[in-house]
Amino acid sequence: MTRLAPAGALLCLATAGCSAWIDDFSVGDSGQDAGLATDSETGTATDADADADADSDTDTDTDVDADTDADSDTSDGSDSSDSDSDTDTSGPACGVFVTPPSGDDLELCTVAPEAFFMGCDGDAAGEDCVADELPMHEVVLSGYEIARFETTNAAFASFVDDQPSWAKDGALAAQKCGSNYLSDWQAGEPVAGMEQRPVTGVCWHAAKAFCQWLGDGFDLPTEARWEHAARGTHDGRDGSAYWMYAFGNAASCDLANFSGCVGGPADVGTATGMAPSGAYDMSGNVWEWVQDWYRSDIYCDPTNSGAFVSPQCNEGYEWADPEGDADGALKGVRGGSWFHEASIMRNAKRQGLEPRSTSNLIGFRCAR
């Protein structure tokens, strides 16, 4: 049974087991399939196996909930929903490096302009779609670059050394993020041995600030870029294989870090499942902040006109470089985490959180 521990007291170490915490957020999705959920009346939550308790900075307890509507996991952490797995042999264009203002170089993958189908196909791979993932629709993207790995503790430490207002006790962090910001750090630094794990406990504002600190047009990836980097054109159209996860349709602990595997965030790139873009950990390890404001009906309202006809309203619509709404209440997270079962780390899975939220389930990567 996985328990949620008091956020301020938690140190998450894979070798010693780990508990999950989330603070300062509200969540949003279709209302049918929340991978993260709150219960303001009871303050309780469940994962696939048991009830869990959580502490919060606010008067509403916040909790984590695994998806009970989709695929189940086997006891060794492998997903038995589909034995079909594919290997991408197209040769991703990675090995591009960018030098931050301080710290080590970061590796990027270059993704060429192309169209792909975004969203969920309920007829493919036995996937159980959720309303906010529908309809599957064509998106046209310009070329972009995306970080091959999730942002590490070491990289974020270089950022806060250069930008002390985003340090654990910094002024901007106190203003923009929850009080459990960087709670897994000690004395303002990552714990020894955790340098190559993804930084967690960072709110959306801090994640965006890190990416922009890199300069040269870096920011958080849009939802469309994120999903394309995870899926490529493995969307079931024009004879291609449909990939439910970033590496195919069969999940195992070798390919991804999800419920039943490590028990906490793992060093980036430890799981061998590589997305078509060449990026690692697009499925599992930690949720990743994206640039867009989350809205459950955005796929059916590409012009933001207020019209909503589900689920065929946007089928086949060529939506060029979508960036979402100009404002909103929740920011998107993608990819699932070490705490959640495989169904939560599907390529199409969407979730929204308050941008000041912090959690040891949530990190980020950058793009430009």
Image (spheres, rainbow, N blue to C red):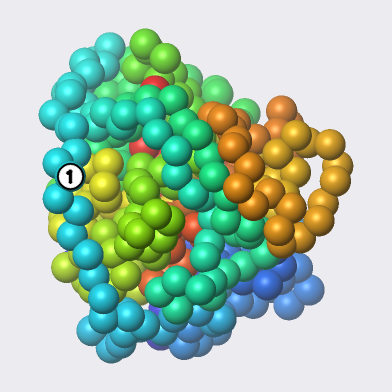
Element under label 1? loop
Q: Amino acid at mark 1?
A: Ser
The residue sitting at 41% across, 60% down in the picture is: 236
Crowding at label 1, few (<14), some or many (≥20) Cα neighbours within 10 Å?
few
Q: In which quadrant of the rendered image does the N terminus lie? A: bottom left
Asked whether 292 or 180 is in front, the reply is 292
Which quadrant holds residue 78? bottom left
Vertical relation: 58 (above or below) 326: below
Q: Quadrant of residue 42?
A: bottom right
Q: Residue at x 64, y 77 (%)?
A: 44
**Residue at the extreme front of the image, as rendered:** 238
Where 353 sits versus 258, above or below?
above
> Which residue occupies the foreground of this view, 198 or 289?
289
> Does the rendering let one see residue 343?
no
In this rendered view, identify the residue nearer to me: 219 or 244: 244
Picture residue at 41% right of the left edge, 84% below the top: 72
Taking 148 as reference, is 207 left or right? right
Residue 341 is situated, as x and y percent measured from the top left of the image, at 41, 74
**Image x and y of residue 302, in percent:** 70, 39
Q: Can you identify the residue that label 1 sits on?
A: 90
Q: Is residue 133 left or right of residue 185?
A: right
Q: In the rendering, at what x and y percent does residue 68 appear? A: 54, 82
Apparent side of residue 258 relative to residue 205 in the rendered image (left or right): left
